[in-house]
């Protein structure tokens, strides 16, 4: 096995639990290492510190996997990791048959995302190392997921490009239907497994259930609705009406299917920055407003621009909220901290000339655990705010 040697004290991040070794931390590398292969990593004293996936083409040159020199990164290793992850989710008493099974670094499998949907799993591989170990992963899923019907790969996005990998969408095992039905609390959904990301955002499950419970007898506005998750919960809990806005016609078509048994549901296709202003000019208002924009800050360089956009969205959301109503704002941008989003909220409240009270701080669902040592695994944050004129 090939070896990588680090500069003095550059192992501290890994020894504290963070698995990323950046190229600048490396002192020397043995020749002819196959990209994506497992390497032994040593500190500047030539002491073994662990095994990891190596990729010379990535800024993160090694993604560490294991401390124990006596453990092999093989089929048994993956089997154990996926078994532990599945047992964790089963122990959380999740009120759904859809959840995240593997949350990358939080499940000690950096570069791997797996979502479970009612007997099917969607695999998203983001690193060359995980790509090379794909067969181990597939077999571990077959071994550990009861009544598994199919495994579908949907490996897309900028992360693969940074690793020098092409995008892939394919059936890996079993059969995959175009759509399947799942439940979440007392709400049911039809999801498109070949849709956005891995098909459904289970990270918002607990927030959807919360807003649904607060929407009985209310008029609900669902901004960036995707396939209607928040609106389905609102209407299932007795909301008077729901208005959904999304730029994707395909997403709205799935939302229409999810909400077909409900009346007083309106669908608006368009850019939210334009649509919200039109609705304000029309003098429309809602009792509960959910603002769930896409990732506006892919990295720290985009933070300032993103915060201006968040402030604009929140300000328009406030203007569309009835006096005493509730407004929820979320950010799924890892580069945006909770305090950043709260600052954007504060500026929007000031400019709107209203009073606001945070009644809930919102987070990613429990099936998206947060590694204590890897702050990047905490990406979804938000606030539920009462607006007073």
Image (cartoon, helix red, strand yellow):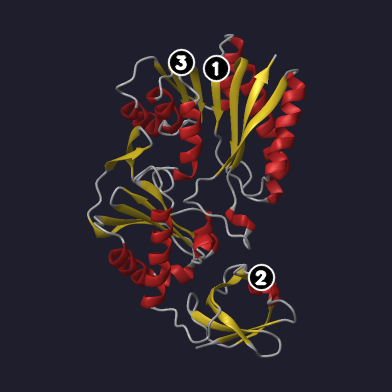
* Image position, residue 255 (x, y; %): 37, 29
Picture quadrant where residue 290 is located: top right
Please say if 18 is above or below 29: above
In the rendered image, the vertical position of residue 147 relative to residue 118, given as above or below = below
* Among numbered discs 1 and 3, the one appearing first in the sequence: 3
Q: Which residue does the image show at 62% across and 60% down from the upper left?
A: 372
- For the C terminus, the image quarter is top right
CA–CA distance in space, label 1 to label 3? 9 Å
- Does residue 246 show up? no
Image position of 35 with respect to 226: above or below: below
Image side of residue 325 versus residue 121, left or right: right
Q: Residue furthest top?
A: 283
Considering depth in this image, is 239 or 294 the residue closer to the camera?
239
Q: Are marks 3 and 2 in contact (CB under 8 Å)?
A: no
- Tell me if I can see residue 106 in this picture: yes
Q: In what element is the residue under mark 2?
A: loop
- Which callout, 3 or 2, points at the residue further toward the start of the chain? 2
Measuring from the top left, give residue 383's x and y in whole percent: 62, 34
Residue 287 got which mark? 1
**Quadrant position of residue 387:** top right
Alpha carbon distance from label 1 to label 2: 46 Å
The crowding category of the residue bearing disc 1, from other C-alpha atoms within 10 Å (few below 14, some 14 to 19, many at least 20), is many
- Report which residue position mark 3 lands on: 217
The reply to whether discs 1 and 3 touch (Cβ–Cβ < 8 Å) is no
* 377, 174: nearer the viewer: 377
Q: Which mark is residue 16?
A: 2
At 65% from the left and 27% from the top, the residue drawn is 314
The reply to whether the C-beta atoms of the residues labelled 1 and 2 are less than 8 Å apart is: no
């Amino acid at each position: 096995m090939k070896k990588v040697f680090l500069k003095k004290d550059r192992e501290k991040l890994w020894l504290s639990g963070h698995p990323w070794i950046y190229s600048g931390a490396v002192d020397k590398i043995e020749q002819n290492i196959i990209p994506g292969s497992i390497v032994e990593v040593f500190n500047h004293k030539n002491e073994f510190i662990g095994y990891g996936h190596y990729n010379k083409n990535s800024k993160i040159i090694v993604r560490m996997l294991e401390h124990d020199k006596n453990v092999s990164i093989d089929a048994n290793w993956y089997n154990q990791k996926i078994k532990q992850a599945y047992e964790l989710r089963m122990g959380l008493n999740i009120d759904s048959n859809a959840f995240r099974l593997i949350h990358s670094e939080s499940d000690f499998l950096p570069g791997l995302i797996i979502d479970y949907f009612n007997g099917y799993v969607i695999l998203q591989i983001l690193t060359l190392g995980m790509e090379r170990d794909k067969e181990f992963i597939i077999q571990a899923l077959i071994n550990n997921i009861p009544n598994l019907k199919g495994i579908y790969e949907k490996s897309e996005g900028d992360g693969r490009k940074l690793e020098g990998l092409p995008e892939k969408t394919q059936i890996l095992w079993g059969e995959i239907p175009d759509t399947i039905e799942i439940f979440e609390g007392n709400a049911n959904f039809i999801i498109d497994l070949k849709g956005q990301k891995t098909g459904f955002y289970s990270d918002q499950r607990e927030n959807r259930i919360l807003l649904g419970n607060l929407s009985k007898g209310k008029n609900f506005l669902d901004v960036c609705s995707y396939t209607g998750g928040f609106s389905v919960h609102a209407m299932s809990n007795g909301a008077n009406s729901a208005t959904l806005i999304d730029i994707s016609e395909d997403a709205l078509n799935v939302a229409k299917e999810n909400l077909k048994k409900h009346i007083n549901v309106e669908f608006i296709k368009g850019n939210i920055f334009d649509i919200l202003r039109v609705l304000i000019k029309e003098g429309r208002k809602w009792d509960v407003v959910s603002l769930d924009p896409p990732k506006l800050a892919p990295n720290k360089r985009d933070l300032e621009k993103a915060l201006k956009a968040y402030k604009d969205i929140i300000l328009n959301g406030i203007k569309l909220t009835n006096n005493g109503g509730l407004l929820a704002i979320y950010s799924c941008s890892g580069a945006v901290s909770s305090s950043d989003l709260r600052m954007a909220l504060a500026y929007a409240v000031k400019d709107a000339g209203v009073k606001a009270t945070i009644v809930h701080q919102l987070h990613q669902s429990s099936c998206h655990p947060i590694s204590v040592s890897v702050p990047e695994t905490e990406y979804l944050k938000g606030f539920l705010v009462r607006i007073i004129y």
